[in-house]
Amino acid sequence: MMLIHTHHFRDIERKPEYLQPEKCVPPPYPGPVGTMWFIRDSCGIACAIVTWFLVLYAEFVVLFVMLIPSRDYVYSIINGIVFNLLAFLALASHCRAMLTDPGAVPKGNATKEFIESLQLKPGQVVYKCPKCCSIKPDRAHHCSVCKRCIRKMDHHCPWVNNCVGENNQKYFVLFTMYIALISLHALIMVGFHFLHCFEEDWTKCSSFSPPTTVILLILLCFEALLFLIFTSVMFGTQVHSICTDETGIERLKRKNQPREHRANWSSVKDTCGGDFSLNWFNPFSRPWQPEMPSDKDLVRQVSSLSDVESTQTTEEHSEEIKDEDSIEVLDE
């Protein structure tokens, strides 16, 4: 075997201080499906706490400022049930997106012995990540926050304190959808409440004083408008990503690294968990569980060494420049 030197940081064989072979120990036996996953990142944890605080603030204003003081009990009950159901689904989706393994590649399998056991043939290569000491399957990328290579990684989202990848993209899509819905619902209720208070005495339309009521409603309106715009955009980009079977990172490399795409409907069904049903909108329903890549799936075929060098040159100019790979290839 020879190591192609496409980047000085990629040559992990010549940089033992960067990735020492003895640190590449075989990965432990994989845990059961559904094992809790949590990223200890202070920024992500803070963003997750802020997310929950803002949703609970909206709950407080909707219930104690608008619905409970209302004399129209039918209006209060219906809107209270709808808003609380959507808020519960949003927070449940947030928890699932945050605590689900997004598709992490096993660490420590980039050992010399394991690579030799693959018995690479002429024209075959394997991509090694020197940061987490793993052999990367196709469409996997390294996340500097999670410190792992993630299969079909779209991006790292601090608001869910996790990567959005193969196993939790459904939950992230549901989270953005439900947040957008409760934001829209809150804006509509705020509008109706202002109209109601203008028509009647402000002291009778809320249990709080008029200045406090106005401040709480304006803050809620600002929060809901901001979240509606942000989550709607994120929801749209994620749906587009699923329908085109192309992650955000892959979109950056599309021009120089064309690849075959699956049928749109097939990608949607895999992400949402089978044929269309109410389970698509259920954060407690698991998406389609892909099989773990076998050893042969870690090996990639190239027509020439120039193809490998072209691929690496593209990666150096992409957002994933931190994802420094090295390549093992067999001389022909």
Image (tube, rainbow, N blue to C red):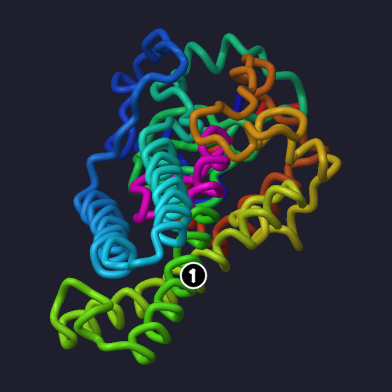
Say how many tags the image has: 1
Query: Mark 1, residues whose alpha carbon is within 10 Å: few (<14), some, or many (≥20)?
Result: many
Could you tell me which quadrant the N terminus lies in?
top right
On screen, residue 270 versus residue 260, left or right, reads left
Question: Residue at the location (23% across, 40% down)?
Answer: 40
162 w.r.t. 232: above or below = above
> 194 or 83, which lies in front?
194
Instruction: Identify which amino acid the numbered label 1 is placed on.
Output: Leu
Q: Residue at x 74, y 53 (%)?
A: 257
Q: Is residue 34 visible?
A: yes
Seen in the picture, residue 208 relative to 108 is either above or below; the reply is: below
**x%, y% of residue 88?**
39, 44
Give the camera-side residue of 34 and 129: 34
| Left or right of 2 on screen, residue 25 | left
Q: Which residue is located at x 19 percent, y 51 percent?
A: 42
Is any part of residue 328 visible from this angle? no
- On the image, the x and y values in percent for residue 178 come to 50, 53
Foreground residue, 91 or 137? 91
Q: Nearest the camera: 178 or 115?
A: 178
Residue drawn at (82%, 45%) of the image:
264
Along the horizontal axis of the image, is 19 left or right of 113?
left
Q: Is residue 179 left or right of residue 28?
A: right
Horizontal and vertical percent position of residue 327: 58, 36
The quarter holding residue 136 reads: top right
Residue 299 to residue 182: above or below? above
Magenta residues (range)? 157-175
Quarter-wise, where is residue 120 in the image? top right
Q: Which residue is mark 1?
A: 228
Helix, strand or loop under label 1: helix
